[in-house]
Structures are given as C-alpha cells and as structure tokens.
Amino acid sequence: MGGCLCCRKPIDYEKLLEQLVHKHRVVIFSKTFCTDSDIAKNIFQMAGADYLAIEMDQLPMTDELMLTLIKKTGFDSVPQIFLDGHFIGGIRELKLYLKSGLLYETLCPNSPLCTTTKNKKTNVNKFIKPVRTCNRRPCQIKPK
C-alpha cells in the first residue's frame, strides 16, 4: 500500500501538531503513567469538557513529535495542554487557570455541567462553576 519506508513521504510534524490542536477544543499531550497527566485529564472530565489525550508513550513517532512540541512550546515535559488552539502550559499552568476561573469561563459556554445566571448589577452572565462532591459513592459534579 505505502511501499517501503525509504520511499514514503516524511511526516510533517509541525503540520500534524497544528491540525491536532485546531481540530479539537482541548488537546492533552500526556503519558499513560504520568500522575500530572492524569490530574489534567481529570480536571477536564470534571469540567465536562471533551478532550483528546495523545499518549506519547503509546506512539511510534514519539521522539519526533516531542521535539516538535518542545520547539513550539518551550516545554520538555508532559502534560502539555492546548485549549482552543492555544498552548496554555502544563499542570501548574492548568491549575492556575482553574483557580483563577479562566478555565470555566472558557469552557462553560459549551459545557452542559455549567449554568449561568445574570448578574443583577451588570446584566452580564455569571458562570456557576461545578463543584466536585464525594461521598462513598463515585464522585459527582453539582453546581454551587
């Protein structure tokens, strides 16, 4: 079908990366056994956001793709998180984004788990962030 490896057209990793981060709202470059990557994926799950997780340790072209990521982002570790086509950083930056409220402001217009109310003084939508509540049963998300 594609012939021998020496005859195949080389992959343009920069183009591949651009296509991935612009095709999906949230893209997380991660590794399957990375705790920080798991935390990042859980944050987006709890926010009700669909995401594409690219497990770098499961891909045959990991080295080339990772070098392209490093060149684009300046980060040499995972997770590397893109939101709406823009690189927001790793787990530390995601946690700051979450703490500041920017994550929900960005995600809520498209998340069924977020609700809005009008601020009476400004007549502007105010997002009510989902809050994780846990008992002995599996965790659920409920608005404040």
Image (cartoon, rainbow, N blue to C red):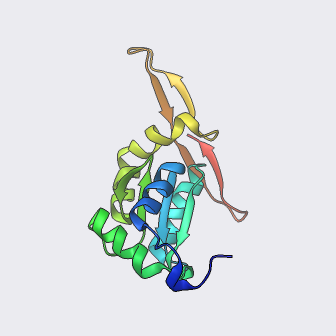
Q: Is residue 16 left or right of residue 136?
A: left
Residue drawn at point x = 63 percent, y = 76 percent = 2
Tell me which residue sits at (57%, 80%) in the image: 58
Query: Does the rendering let one see residue 57?
Result: yes
Which image quadrant for residue 42? bottom right
Residue 88 in percent (x, y) is at 35, 54
Could you say where residue 109 lies in the image, as x and y percent from the top left? 54, 34
Q: Determine whether, in the image, residue 65 is placed left or right of residue 109.
A: left
Apparent side of residue 133 relative to residue 75 in the rendered image (left or right):
right
Closer to us: 26 or 14: 14
Question: Closest to the observer: 142 or 58?
Answer: 58
Q: Residue 23: x percent and y percent?
A: 53, 50
**The N terminus appears in which quarter of the rendering?**
bottom right
Q: In the current view of this chain or complex, which residue is farthest to the right?
A: 137
- Residue at coordinates 62% horizontally, 81% vertically from top-left? 3
Q: Tell me: residue 144, above or below residue 132.
A: above
In the image, residue 94 above or below residue 62:
above
* Residue closest to the far left: 74
The structure residue drawn at horizontal position 50% and vertical position 42%, both measured from the top left corner, is 107
Residue 25 visible in the snapshot: no
- Is the residue 1 above or below the residue 87 in the image? below
Residue 63 or residue 101, whichever sits in front = 63
Whole-percent x and y of residue 51?
A: 57, 56
Q: 14 and 35: which one is in front?
A: 14
Q: Look at the picture and state if 106 lies above or below 123.
A: below
Name the image quarter holding the C terminus: top right
